[in-house]
Amino acid sequence: MFHVEHHKEELLRKHLQWVLSTNKIHNLTAITDEAGAWRLHVLDSLAPLPEIMSASDGPLLDIGSGGGFPGVPLGVMSERETVCLDSVKKKASALGEFLRSDEGYHNIAAQGLRAEELAAIQPDYYAITIARAVAQLNSIVELASPILQIGGVCLCMKAHVTDEEIQAGDNAAEKCGLIRKQIRNYTLQGGDETRCIVEYVKVAQPQVNLPRRTGVAQKRPLS
């Protein structure tokens, strides 16, 4: 799949062990065995690495990061400035404390904010946004648009996606200044689970006023 340098693998494993050890407090994952979590969390998080490495220079934002997947593995491997964003402030605070405990994660930070709040602070700032199993495509592109630079990419990691969801995502993307570039299917290493990465590119400023009020993108998504 790809080569992981020894020191980077150590950082990936240290993060995973932290997630598993603090899981009872912060409810970060339903997967409690290390081997299963390595495959289903770490290796799956690294699936978009080709898209990350080929994107324009600039920071990466993981929307709805929770315990730091996929943001921490991607930040470790790509060495990009990376922010793991989660609306649950306690989770973000715990992750941030862990990241500050090791200089190896110096390029990765955590913030406890909603995407709409971050858009007001850092508009048009990020080169990449990524969301893993967070929401429907039309909600994700709306949340990503005001945060992304022109030319920035929005990556959506999905276990499965219907034609209807793709069409709704495309419709919302057009209103938000994005176009769909590709859908890449892949099989999770060590198993037969199929996943896909839907990639959009921001080509213009949105036609609608974004961000809308907090939560509206999920409750009443554009279509």
Image: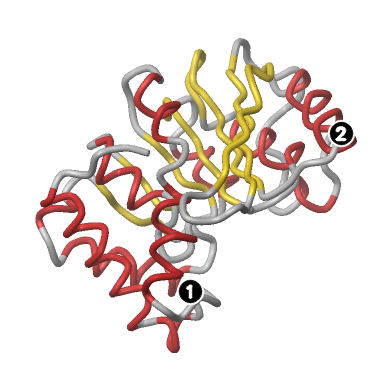
Q: Position of residue 59 (x, y in %)?
A: 34, 32
Q: Earlier in the sequence, mark 1 or mark 2?
A: 1
Q: Which mark is residue 12?
A: none
Pick the residue in front: 192 or 156.
Answer: 192
Left or right? Give the position of 142 relative to 62: right
Is 193 positioned to the left or the right of 113 in the image? right
Tell me what residue is drawn at x 9 percent, y 55 percent: 103
Q: Secondary structure at mark 1?
A: loop
Residue 39 is drawn in which quadrant? bottom left
Residue 132 x/y as whole percent: 57, 49
Q: Nearer the viewer, residue 215 or 38?
A: 38
Residue for point 54% across, 61% down: 87
Discs 1, 2 touching: Cβ within 8 Å: no
**Residue labelled with disc 2:** 163
Q: Nearer the viewer, mark 1 or mark 2?
A: 2
* Numbered tag placed on residue 28 in the rendering: 1
Identify the image quadrant of the C terminus: top right
Nearest to the observer: residue 190 or residue 87: 190
| Mark 2, other Cα within 10 Å: few <14 / some 14–19 / many ≥20 | few
Colour theme: secondary structure
Look at the numbered disc 2 and give the secondary structure of its residue. Answer: helix
